[in-house]
Amino acid sequence: MLLNKEKGYKIYLSFLQTVLTLALIWWVNEYFMLKVPIVVCIFFCLAFAVLIYFFDNSKNSGVRFVVLLSLPPSLGLVFLIFRTNPFLWVKSIASWCIKYDRTDELYELMPAYTVLAVISCLASILLYLSVKKLLIRMILAAAVLVVFIIFGALEINLDKVVVGIGIFYILCCLIEMSGFLYSKKAGKDDKKESILYLLPVCLLLTIISVGLPSRPEPIQWKSVKNIYYAVRDKIDKLITEWEFFTGKGDGIFSISLSGYSEESSLDNEDLAGDKKIALIIKGRKGLSPLYLTGSVSDTYTGYSWEKSDEGYLADEEEYQIDYAELVYGLSRLESRVFDEYRFLEKASINIYYKNIRTKTFFYPSKSYWFEFLEPVREPDTKKAGITFPKAMGDKVAYSVSYYEMNLREAQFQEMLRSADSFSYEKNEDINFEQIELLERKLYLWDKDDFLLNRNNFYELLKKRSDIIRKIYTQLPENLPERVRELAREITGDKGSNYDKLKAIEVYLLKYPYSYTPGKVPEGYDFVDYFLFENKKGYCTSFATSMAVLARCVGIPTRYVEGFLVDYSEKTDGGFLVRNSNAHAWVEAYFEGVGWIPFEPTPNFHELRYTVWPSASKETGMENYGNNIMVPKEQSSDQTPEKTVEKLKNNENSADVLVWVLFAAGIVLILFGAITCYYLLLRYRYRKEYIEADYSRKMYMIFVRILLMLKYEGFTLGKQETLLMLSNKVKDRLRFNNIIFSDVADIYMAYRYGEIPVSKEALKAVETFYKGLSEYRKSKSKKFKLLLEDFIFLIRKNSLDIIT
């Protein structure tokens, strides 16, 4: 009985190690998004726990040595089957761990499973060695509690599985410690196995505590924090409302983060870093940072930017006509260019207003469609700065579809350079087939009256170009001459407008960025003071200076303010856009192509011109704009999204197949190891039987006969004698006129009468054993008999079936 309690206590410790390992690997799995099912996690924990327990409690058994010896060839066989270099495989797993950023693009099934298996193995070994000592178990319990508190304070999410296991472990440790202290105080021996009777209580308390209604977020202090955040959010909204109603303007967004004005004043001594959340963006992360157009100005006064009503076609939607002109520009390129180079990438996002109140409608450049998620009054889309009829707050939510432009693509840049040779005055031939091809293969049919589907689209674009040339090249008469001279000096040796713009952009990058550039002295032009006197500023300084310098050499430009979404801050709700993400940049007009953005601000320049991954040139695909890749002669319903999904499914299927083959190989190796162990036990048993005398041989056979009789239903009870067993069997089993009572008499004469066993007596026992064996073979399956034999050989030294 004492032995059973001791064994039960060992199993309890092994169980603690198993559940702690499960909590650890499940948290790792969830936090690092390894996407391993919980069933597999449980399997890893149980498998390593059983192996470790077996190794620790079979020190004198040959099984552990067989398993240890089988491990190297087993692993070698696995790598051989998959034709994998083990060193390169380990290196690839390590490389994946370093580069994996928890995104679907970099996720791989095999490394994820492997990493979790390795962590499970190491954690199982370490925890099994640790939980043997009561003091260490107490320390671990305290550590678990501290981790829960820290994670709660930091709002790091913990799954209920992890929380439940932690609570269970802490309860077990508290009960053990209480029992230890009570025993010590009472002067009694520590009944450490008493915890076995209280395990159900711990489990019940854990189920009740975890089963209580809760949120998926951390529980600790969450209610208090929710109240704090709710109050803070309400205060932020009230402040926003107050700023709006006490502001000078009519609710049009501006870079000045403390209010709104109908014109963008550039004379700000300081730029405040307001951390209030203005917008939330939901959608897939783009290839480049997302710039949301807000306020667009066309008139520079020397100290501010203003908006006129003359820079647009009266009856057209500016964002649509700008998008259409880009399509027209692409239609003039040779078709082969789209097969080799990546120009555009289609994207869609949802925009939610938070702590902001403004008339401004924010949208990305080259947007072609938007739809409100909640009913609102439709905005005015005639100007580039789209506005609502009245200031809107946190009820605004809409979806926008647009195209990202690959501004770093050399062929895209060549298209902009070649725009200098194009003019709507030339009345060039229109390639309607190419336009139709681009519309059908690349762009959505969002409207029946889309500009390029109209007969007069060329005349509309020409009229708009004339307006842009007139309005967006204006400069104040009192602009200092040294600003114009500097512009000519910077661009003097450049052959195209694009190269002139890039030269201006590069020139401005040498100026330092500063949130506190100081106030512009009275009487100074803003750009002149920045370029020649102050020589430091923030985004408004750089964007304004580039717009003015470009206008000095005849290039139409406009000043844009909005938000920069660099995808650096993300929550479960989406990407956060704070007021401090407000930014200003410049856009230049290329006749026949449209408005193209530029980034002269040093801290943002590299961010704007992100390098895109190159498109495959050997895919057998027709690539229109390198956005949607359509297989040649492929049906239209086989979209790239479906193609990518199929590829992912194929990859996942291949990974699953690899794991199935891996598991099958392990099973075969274990089966081979068990078979070898069984043969080894049989060899040892036969050798022992051959070397034994007649008495020992009889004893070995008699033990096996008793086990066989037990399988036949003739059990020798603890209070029964062999004589009673003989009366049960009687003559039901007779082989060559030998019955069980004859065999029992021979055993009892040897055991109690100390009469040596003769050769004839041994032969009689062997005859009965062989007959009983043949009888059982005739009525039992071979696998069952082999399993019984295997169990007997393992337990033969510990059998206690003879009274």
Image (cartoon, rainbow, N blue to C red):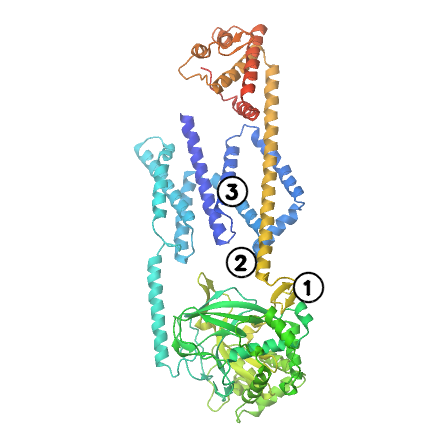
What residue type is disc 2 on? Thr
Q: Comparing marks 1 and 2, which lies closer to the viewer? A: 1
What residue type is disc 1 on? Lys
Instruction: Look at the image and tell me whether residue 509 can be seen.
Output: no
Say which element carries label 3: helix
Q: Is residue 669 left or right of residue 702?
A: right
Q: How many marks?
A: 3
> Which quadrant: the C terminus?
top left
List x then y, in percent, for residue 442.
Answer: 60, 69
Determine which quarter of the picture holds residue 191.
top left
Residue nearer the viewer, 671 or 509: 671
Circle 3 is placed at which residue position? Answer: 44
Circle 1 is placed at which residue position? Answer: 617
Asked if 691 appears above or below 285 in the picture, the reply is above
Determine which quarter of the picture holds residue 491.
bottom right
Say which element carries label 2: loop
What residue type is disc 3 on? Phe
Query: Which numbered disc covers residue 103?
Result: 2
Q: Please report whichever mark, 3 or 1, sits nearer to the chain's N-terminal start.
A: 3
List x then y, in percent, for residue 66.
Answer: 60, 31
Asked if 529 appears above or below 779 in the picture, the reply is below
Q: Is residue 307 left or right of residue 440?
A: left
Dot 3: few (<14), some (14–19), or many (≥20) neighbours within 10 Å? many
Dot 1: few (<14), some (14–19), or many (≥20) neighbours within 10 Å? few
Asked if 540 appears above or below 780 in the picture, the reply is below
Residue depicted at 51% across the width and 66% down the height: 567
**How far apart are the two marked residues, 3 and 1, measured between alpha carbons?**
43 Å
